[in-house]
Amino acid sequence: MIVATATDTTYVELTGILLASLADRAAGDFETVHVFCDGVSDADKARLQASYGLANIDFIDLTDEMARHFAGRPENHHLSRTAYARILMPLSLSEATGRLLYIDCDTVVNAPLAPLASLPMEGFALAAVDDIARQVPERHAKRNRDIGLPDDMRYFNSGVLLIDLERWRAERISERTIAFVDAHPTLPMMDQDALNGALRGEWLPLDESWNLHRRLEKGAYTDDPAIWQGARIVHFIGQVKPNYTDCNHPARDLFLAYRARTPFAGDPLKTKFGRKVEKKGRKLRRFFGKLKRRVFGA
């Protein structure tokens, strides 16, 4: 089994903490971790390497060919084009066989990953965890309806994906997903909607501990805090990440403990105002990127 994630300049710190947790809790459970990078500097790659601390890490810059697939795809205020990278990873890592575990960079690994290497896939190309929207039937039904799925069809969160590489390629899931994006240019949840739309329920459900995620409800997390103790992978969804001063996530202490082991330990935590600045900065970068593609065809 191999592991992969994707990051850009905004999420370098989060990626470093993920890598630190991965090395601590799951070293030896996989062959290599591949980090797909969009505009990440050599200096930041060095900080990521130091956060991980092991030799089996591979940095892959998004190529022009990969970027071409993302050009014009919908983006929003906290999800960038790196969100689409997971769709192409099985094709980009063309020599890889067996299983690929994709993990979002805004996660912390909290248990060994070895069980996923031997988990029966039951003939499916993908295993994933139900999205938290499933706990609210009306929200779940609307999400499905927005992308043309039956109201009660299962819908997964794309933050953790266990992929059977050979079956994925044989079923042309990358190509089908890209086609779904092309046919639905205003996807509310971007790559996650596209993957669910392309697979139409043909995936294996994993226990939620492999991608434990919760939404903020009126500024608070309402579940019993004890659920996070058994999480194998904690996923910090939403805009308020654990490296922000106003984050009140129940598992934030776990994140901060790993942060303290990395080169990011001395960096000041980000602020709510900083989040607004980053949001505006991403909007400007997307605008000028689109303008460049229109003018120069790049």
Image (spheres, helix red, strand yellow):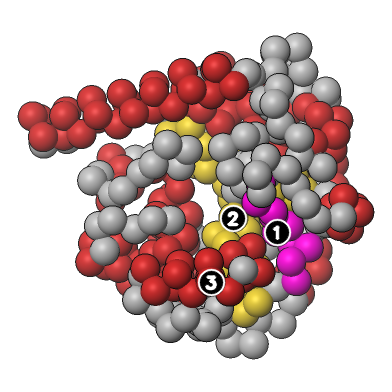
Q: Are marks 1 and 3 in contact (CB under 8 Å)?
A: no
**Dot 2: within a 10 Å radius of its alpha carbon, few (fewer than 14), some, or many (20 or more) residues?**
many
Whether residue 119 can be seen here: yes
Marking on residue 159: 2
Q: Is 194 in the magenta?
A: no
Q: Amino acid at mark 2?
A: Gly
Q: CA distance from mark 3 to mark 2?
A: 22 Å
Closest to the observer: 182 or 222? 222
Q: Residue furthest front?
A: 218
Closest to the observer, 166 or 80: 80
Q: CA distance from mark 2 to mark 1?
A: 7 Å
Of residues 211 and 25, the one drawn nearer to the viewer in this rendering: 211
Residue at which label 1 appears:
211
Q: Main secondary structure of the magenta part?
A: loop
Residue sitting farthest toward the bottom: 122
- Residue 210 part of the magenta-drawn span: yes
Residue 177 position, x and y percent, is 36, 67
Say which residue appears at 82% left-offset and 42% top-offset: 250
The magenta-colored residue range is 207-216
Dots 2 and 1: beta carbons under 8 Å? yes
Which residue position is annotated with label 3?
138
Q: Is residue 267 left or right of residue 173?
A: right
Give the quarter of the image for residue 183: bottom left
Relative image position of residue 281 (x, y in whole percent): 39, 21
> How busy is the neighbourhood of tag 1: few (under 14 within 10 Å), some, or many (20 plus)?
many
Name the image quarter holding residue 204. Answer: bottom right
User: Nearer the viewer's eye, disc 1 or disc 3?
Assistant: 3
Q: Earlier in the sequence, mark 1 or mark 3?
A: 3
